Image: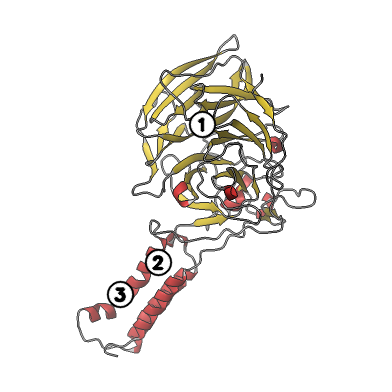
């Protein structure tokens, strides 16, 4: 019996099978917020205000017990400095605070079939000729692989044991033909199970000439595919809950079969919860639960040395940790996205392997009929156009709560996030596969400086979700000053005007 099962049951939630759109005319809010104690934004502002006041000559003389002769000029200096601090704060200088965006999703998927915390991974397959027919593949550890359309509807279920991880790579030679290869970490079979996607029928079926990939004594919990830009060879990485990480080479043979060989073993230390590979940069990213994100070389001959991207203890991540994903723009531009589950957020870092600068974070909040994301574990992102629904790229974030029903994913246009930062993130829908050093284009495709060039065509006379006639309708607020900071500044100002002994 074929593992392919067509889903044709009634939706358990209103409008769930076709996904739910927010009102295209409504503008999602993306409010900038100051961080918690872990993020120094508010503390830095208070430090600046107090130290400018307390560091003045008058304040130092008062603390030493020296007599102070106040006059209009000296008082004016203090008041000028205080007003200067206030002016700087009100202008929202970005270096003073970490940026944490709140963005409203525009679509959500139908709920998964398993109950409880069952989603263990996800991957996006982009249709090569009809991007609107792209699929979101979700690993459900009770029911297998679930295939969702971009409008949120559940298309089909692939049942061949449970699934703990999934990845997709386009153009892999399977049975002598370049095809989209899907690899599933299947603990039931203790193997990485290969499938191919038929772009015509959207059917997923077992790959011909490529048997399930097995390593003695190894049970995979996550998987990532890699095509070397140096040799053109295809590799599969697999991690486990024991901390073991293995790399296989998938070599096509003249008879149409694929030979698999183990080429590398790594010991991460703790449970591996997610993998992502930057093909163009030959870099592997590994999430170690309770510890942080590591960067390794992706070539089989690379050393086992690793570099820390971010950590839990003394860093910015808040456990439990979750998935990582890559937004790959042209050249070395782009971003590494990482789930920081303990703060219901996704953190964004620069893609460059030698400088993973933290750019900020975002969380998905409620928008009418679509609930907020809580306790996320996985994230999927693409810079490529996905038709009229997501013409400038898309982000999908896992939601553990989903309004007290089974888990699902919330979808949002990439520009709704990218345009929310004081310095907007790059939006580039090109292939982004060649490390050609790129040319900065101000975050707009093709180097245009006019935002109107990124306005997608209307659908049935209306702008796609997340857009209006002027472009992305992020409506992101500029950085605001917390009331407590204003109160402190008011106190500092009054104190500066008080004469000694008054």
The quadrant the N terminus occupies is top right
Residue 3 in the image: x percent, y percent?
Answer: 64, 23
**Looking at the image, which is closer to me, 444 or 134?**
134
Q: Earlier in the sequence, mark 3 or mark 1?
A: 3
| Apparent side of residue 414 relative to residue 351 in the rendered image (left or right) | right
Of the 4 image quadrants, the one containing the C terminus is bottom left
Q: CA distance from mark 2 to mark 1?
A: 44 Å
The residue pinned by badge 2 equals: 45
Regarding residue 433, the answer to whether it shows in the image is no
* Residue extending farthest top: 255
Classify 144 as above or below 478: above
Name the front one of labels 3 and 1: 1
Q: Quadrant of residue 211?
A: top right
Give the residue drawn at x 56%, y 12%: 253
**Which of disc 1 and disc 2 is earlier in sequence?**
2
Residue ID for mark 3: 54
Q: CA distance from mark 3 to mark 1?
A: 57 Å
Using a 10 Å C-alpha cutoff, classify the residue at mark 3 as few (fewer than 14 neighbours), some (14 to 19) or many (20 or more). some
What's the distance in space between the residues labelled 3 and 2, CA to CA?
Answer: 14 Å
| Label 1: element kind | loop
Depth check: give the residue in front, 470 or 42: 42
Q: Is residue 492 left or right of residue 252?
A: left
Q: Residues within 10 Å of mark 1 (few under 14, many from 20)?
A: many
Left or right placement of residue 334 versus residue 390 in this view: left
Find out whether the residues at labels 2 and 1 contact each other: C-beta distance under 8 Å.
Answer: no
- Write down the residue under mark 1: 164
């Amino acid at each position: 019996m074929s593992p392919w099962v067509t889903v044709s049951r009634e939706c358990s939630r209103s409008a769930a099978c076709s996904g739910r759109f927010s009102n295209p005319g409504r503008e999602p809010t993306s409010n900038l917020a100051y961080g918690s104690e872990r993020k120094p934004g508010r503390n830095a502002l208070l430090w600046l205000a107090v130290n400018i006041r307390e560091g003045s000559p008058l304040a130092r003389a008062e603390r030493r017990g020296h007599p102070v002769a106040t006059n209009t000029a000296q008082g004016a200096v203090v008041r000028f400095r205080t007003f200067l601090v206030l002016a700087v704060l009100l202008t929202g200088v970005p270096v003073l605070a970490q940026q944490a965006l709140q963005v409203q999703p525009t679509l959500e998927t139908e709920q998964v079939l398993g109950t409880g915390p069952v989603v263990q991974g996800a991957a996006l397959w982009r249709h090569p000729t009809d991007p609107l027919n792209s699929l979101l593949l979700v690993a459900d550890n009770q029911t297998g692989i679930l295939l969702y359309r971009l409008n949120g509807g559940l298309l089909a279920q692939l049942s061949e044991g449970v699934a703990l991880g999934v990845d997709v790579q386009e153009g892999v030679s399977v049975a002598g033909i370049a095809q989209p290869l899907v690899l599933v970490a299947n603990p039931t079979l203790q193997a990485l199970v290969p499938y191919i996607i038929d772009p015509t029928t959207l059917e997923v079926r077992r790959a011909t000439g490529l048997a399930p990939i097995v390593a003695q004594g190894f049970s995979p919990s996550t998987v990532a595919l890699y095509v070397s830009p140096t040799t053109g060879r295809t590799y599969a990485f697999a991690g486990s809950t024991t901390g073991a990480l293995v790399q296989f080479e998938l070599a096509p043979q003249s008879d149409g079969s694929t030979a698999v060989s183990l080429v590398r073993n790594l010991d991460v230390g703790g449970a591996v919860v997610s993998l992502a590979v930057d093909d163009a940069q030959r870099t592997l990213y590994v999430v170690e639960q309770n510890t942080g994100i590591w960067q390794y070389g992706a070539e089989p001959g690379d050393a086992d040395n690793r570099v820390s991207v971010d950590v839990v203890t003394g860093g910015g991540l808040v456990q439990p940790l979750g998935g990582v994903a890559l937004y790959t723009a042209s050249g070395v531009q782009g971003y590494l996205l990482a789930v920081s589950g303990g703060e219901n957020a996704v953190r964004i870092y620069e893609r460059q392997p030698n400088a993973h600068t933290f750019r900020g974070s975002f969380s998905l909040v409620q928008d009418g009929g679509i609930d907020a994301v809580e306790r996320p574990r996985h994230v999927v992102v693409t810079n490529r156009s996905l038709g009229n629904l997501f013409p400038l790229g898309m982000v999908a974030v896992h939601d553990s709560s989903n309004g007290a029903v089974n888990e699902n994913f919330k979808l949002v246009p990439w520009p709704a996030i990218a345009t929310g930062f004081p310095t907007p993130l790059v939006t580039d829908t090109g292939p982004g596969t060649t490390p050609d050093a790129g040319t900065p284009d101000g975050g707009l495709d093709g180097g245009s400086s006019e935002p109107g060039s990124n306005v997608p065509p209307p659908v049935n006379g209306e702008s796609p979700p997340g857009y209006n006639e002027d472009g992305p309708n992020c409506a992101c607020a500029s950085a605001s000053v917390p009331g407590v900071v204003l109160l402190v500044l008011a106190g500092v100002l009054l104190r500066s005007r008080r004469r000694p002994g008054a």
